[in-house]
Image (tube, grey):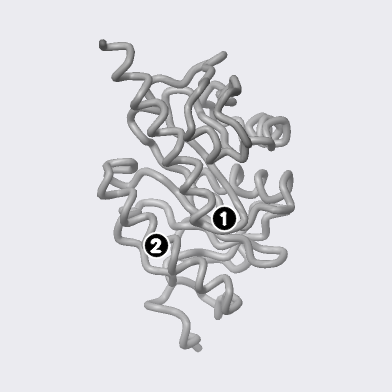
Amino acid sequence: MVQPWQTGVKSLYPLPAPSPLTKQDLRRTTALAAQSANRSWHPATGGNFSVRDGAMCWVSPSGKHKGLLKWSDFLPVDFETAQLIQPCYVKPSDETALHCAIYRADPTARAVMHVHPPHTTALVGPDFVLSNNEMLKAFGYKSHEVDVKIPCIPNTQDMENLGRSVALNLDLKLLVLEGHGVYAWGKNPDEAIFRIEALEFLCQLRSLTQRA
């Protein structure tokens, strides 16, 4: 029997229903994903998103343009095991394990966003530091007079190693995969995207300054 919250056939068995708050966050995530797609932050099928819901998280599917997501496209995953709650015809993101590692490492995380903003992707590498800009307050600092090292690690498919890197970089609640893109998380989808917006603005400003 297909449950009323399902759109189309995704599973051999009825999938669990997201809680009302999670459904609200999923709807908000799809709206933010559409906005970031319009910024060319995740062209084609790039990018992935998730929302935590108790002991599970709802993860965006693989192989679909993330600017066209519906809340009902998300798939339920046990974040302790990084496995689907039910076998599905649809495959979750290839980077599901990293989303799960974030939820395991940071109990305050409720939403994770992964996109490929061009200035961040092009500029941020090891020992990348941002200083003296009001936008640094978006990361929780009380003053702009700080030096902030942006956590950046090599892009790899070793999800276990990436998970350990997440646990070591919880202060800023973001992590750049070198030459690939950025993960950010927060108590809600907006908080996650704010961190990405702030970092991309600062990297764009750095790029303009370097050209001058």
Measured in 3D between alpha carbons, the distance from the residue under mark 2 to the one under mark 1, in whole angstroms, is: 12 Å
**How many marks can you see?**
2
Residue 155 coordinates in the image, percent (x, y): 51, 26
Q: Amino acid at mark 2?
A: Thr
Residue 123 coordinates in the image, percent (x, y): 40, 19
Secondary element at tag 2: helix
Q: Residue at x 51, y 22 (%)?
A: 132
Which numbered dot is residue 30?
A: 2
In the displayed structure, 16 sits above or below 117; it is: below
Q: Amino acid at mark 1?
A: Ala
In the displayed structure, 128 sits above or below 54; it is: above
Q: Residue at x 39, y 57 (%)?
A: 32
Q: Residue at x 57, y 70 (%)?
A: 22
Q: Quadrant of the C terminus?
A: top left
* Marked residue nearer the N-terminal end (2 or 1): 2
Which numbered dot is residue 111?
A: 1
